Image (cartoon, rainbow, N blue to C red):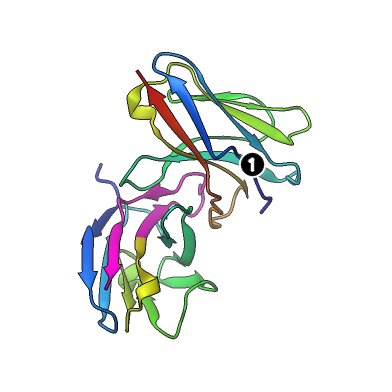
């Protein structure tokens, strides 16, 4: 069974440019999470979806970040415009809603903003 | 979710048991203890979780004290591939809630 797929794995952009990250969760997982991990820190939740609905986006900087999960499967996280402080690893995870003991993480997208 | 405290780093010789401690003195009755690890350049990986009884799976054992204020993750025979950052997390089970990661313990397994 395929795990959580993320692309791209690496992205280098200049500040003020837009960037987008894509995530395909494990088949059948109806809960999807986006986390951000700064260097030397643990991941922090940005947004959580249950099917198509964003049920926790309290930590998402809504002035520049947006996310969507059309059809309740794969998801896209966008930053526009990017700032230097957005340099981090963006991790996607998924789980089953009714047995959410285990969140399965993708490899992440490493973003560098110059 | 309750806060956890872990040592910043630990070393372990290959083949020996690695015992990683975690303090969670403010844990609530409905919160479980989870352990995840993150190998360099990979996403976090689930290891084990428990409520109050000791748990064991193919990866590790989890020992939770009777008062539930602390726990220990045991890797019985550490290998070089176990070198990673280990995160202890407490979380209410039964919900698809977020995982609140701290800074974890960096375990270095050496020859």
Tell me which residue sits at (70%, 34%) in the image.
B70
Tell me which residue sits at (32%, 51%) in the image.
A106
Per the image, label 1 sits on a secondary structure element best described as strand
Q: Is residue A109 left or right of residue A43?
A: left
Range of the magenta residues?
A90-114
Q: Is residue A55 left or right of residue B68?
A: left
The extreme right residue here reads B67
The residue nearer to you, when weighing A43 against B105, is: B105
The residue that disc 1 covers is B32
* Label 1 Cα crowd, 10 Å radius (few <14 / some 14-19 / many 20+): many
Chain on which label 1 sits:
B
- Quadrant assignment, res A22: bottom left
In the picture shown, does residue B24 fall above or below A95? above
Quarter of the image with the N terminus of chain B is bottom right
- Quadrant assignment, res A110: bottom left
Q: Position of residue B90 (x, y in %)?
A: 62, 45
Magenta span contains residue A108: yes
């Amino acid at each position: 069974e395929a795990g959580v797929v993320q692309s791209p794995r690496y992205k280098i952009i200049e500040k003020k440019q837009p960037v987008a990250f894509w995530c395909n969760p494990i088949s059948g997982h109806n809960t999807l999470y986006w986390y951000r991990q700064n260097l030397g820190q643990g991941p922090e939740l940005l947004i959580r979806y249950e099917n198509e609905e964003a049920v926790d986006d309290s930590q998402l900087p809504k002035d520049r970040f947006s996310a969507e999960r059309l059809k309740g499967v794969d998801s896209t996280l966008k930053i526009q415009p990017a700032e230097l402080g957005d340099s981090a690893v963006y991790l996607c995870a998924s789980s089953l809603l009714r047995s959410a003991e285990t969140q399965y993480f993708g490899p992440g997208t490493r973003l560098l903003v110059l | 979710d309750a806060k956890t405290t872990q040592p910043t780093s630990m070393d372990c010789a290959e083949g020996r048991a690695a015992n990683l401690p975690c303090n969670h003195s403010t844990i609530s009755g409905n919160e479980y203890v989870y352990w995840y690890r993150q190998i360099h350049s990979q996403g976090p990986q689930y290891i084990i979780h428990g409520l109050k009884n000791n748990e064991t799976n193919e990866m590790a054992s989890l020992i939770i004290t009777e008062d539930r204020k602390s726990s220990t993750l045991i890797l019985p025979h550490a290998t070089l591939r176990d070198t990673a950052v280990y995160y202890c997390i407490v979380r209410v089970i039964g919900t698809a809630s977020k995982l609140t990661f701290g800074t974890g313990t960096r375990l270095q397994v050496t020859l």
